[in-house]
Amino acid sequence: MSTSTQQPSTAPAGPAQEQAELGRHAKQAPWVPWAVFGAAAVVSLGIGLLTGFNVVLFVIYTVVLGTVGTYLLSRATEGRRKATDRLVTCLVVSAFGIAMVPLVSLVYEVVRRGAERFDGEFFGASLVGIIGPGGGAYHAIMGTLIITLLTTLISVPIGLMTAIYLVEYGTGRLKRSITFLVDVMTGIPSIVAGLFAYALFVLIFGPGVRLGIMGAIALSVLMIPVVVRSAEEVLKLVPNELREASYALGVSKWRTIVKVVIPTAIAGLGTGVTLAIARVIGETAPLLITVGITNATNFDPFDGRMATLPVYAYYQLTQPGVPPENAIDRAWTAALVLIMLVMGLNVVARLISRFFAPKTGR
């Protein structure tokens, strides 16, 4: 009779075995990582007191020491797999925290410094006859609104029609050429847009010309490719089934676009346009070249210089006069108003996306 020997199984460990391996390690309490980072902050503060406190170095030391400490403690108590997971989590959260530091510090500083002149006079008066304290940015606020409105009126029709052509009509070499040019325009420096507008109007009106419409043209060069790109992506999201159903009913192509495609994508189009406005409303370099600055209020973009908030803040900071404190306070408040405008436009974009999106629920 032959005898057989049974060999031990060498099959790879299954989920049950991995779970049993993980169960052999203790599990940290939720507060332990926070305690580790708190201890790292204390150590970093001690290092800062010994070597000279610096906020940036304090944050870096805290992040590095806390991450290393969390990993080592988890490796000793929870095992390699859980320690690796905690390491990656710490790196992601730390990267987010480090990215938020300059943003939070910037907003805090602008709000703190800009609140000193955030009053009725700042929004209701210009700088005509103002040398020392007082004065405001009414003329700059109105100039920014007028030039931004003109920029929107120029850019939105051109950008939307270009996007419609690329999605609905464009084929072949012409479509590829337009797409390439839009990509190039998206990356051009803003100063180039200002030089283009200035050179264009110098050829027509001669050297030294400064007009509000010139600033609108310069900003349109920056805004149009943003509108084209955002509108193109939104129009591509419209299901082809809607177009085919319209064609099956005998509706022409242009009417399908106007009655089916655009209403379906109206929320995304509105969001893209609003974000494009927020992109150009704070530009300074093109307006420095094309519009210039003035202390008086000018509502006519086709006649003379106009003040805008970015250029107003720039001149108040770089040419403050004597004493400089009053002009610098006005510059900080102008920066605060610009941030509020951009944040307001982003909120409007979110509201448009939320309330005007197609209702898909039954």
Image: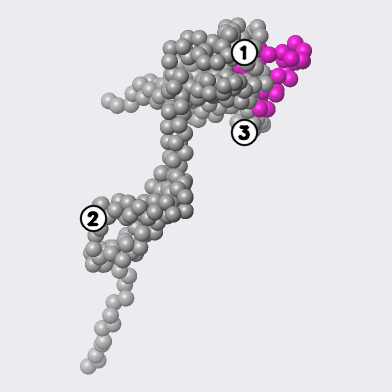
Q: Amino acid at mark 1?
A: Thr
Q: How many numbered marks, from 0 up?
A: 3
Residue closer to the observer: 14 or 230: 230
Quadrant of the rendered structure where residue 223 is?
top right
Instruction: Please name the residue shown 61% across and 25% down the image.
Output: 318
Residues under numbered marks 3 and 2 in contact, where contact means CB atoms less than 8 Å apart: no
Residue 29 disc label: 2
**What residue did someone put label 1 on?**
294
Over which residues does the magenta segment extend?
191-217
Q: CA distance from mark 1 to mark 2?
A: 63 Å
Q: CA distance from mark 1 to mark 3?
A: 30 Å
Instruction: Please name the residue shown 57% across and 17% down the image.
Output: 308
Circle 1 or circle 3, nearest the eye? 1
Asked which secondary structure carries label 2, the reply is: loop
Residue 132: % across, % down: 55, 15
Asked which secondary structure carries label 1, the reply is: loop
Instruction: Please name the residue shown 23% across and 67% down the image.
Output: 24
**What residue did someone put label 3 on?**
187
Residue 61: % across, % down: 43, 53
Question: Callout 3 environment at 10 Å: few (<14), some (14 to 19), or many (20+)?
Answer: few
Q: Main secondary structure of the magenta part?
A: helix
Question: Callout 2 environment at 10 Å: few (<14), some (14 to 19), or many (20+)?
Answer: few
Circle 1 or circle 2, nearest the eye? 1
Asked which secondary structure carries label 3, the reply is: loop
Residue closer to the observer: 113 or 80: 113
Q: Amino acid at mark 3?
A: Gly
Residue closer to the observer: 110 or 73: 110
Q: CA distance from mark 3 to mark 2?
A: 49 Å
Q: Residue furthest front?
A: 323
Query: Is tag 3's residue or tag 2's residue first in the polypeptide sequence?
Result: 2
Query: Is tag 1's residue or tag 2's residue first in the polypeptide sequence?
Result: 2
Quadrant of the rendered structure where residue 116 is?
top left
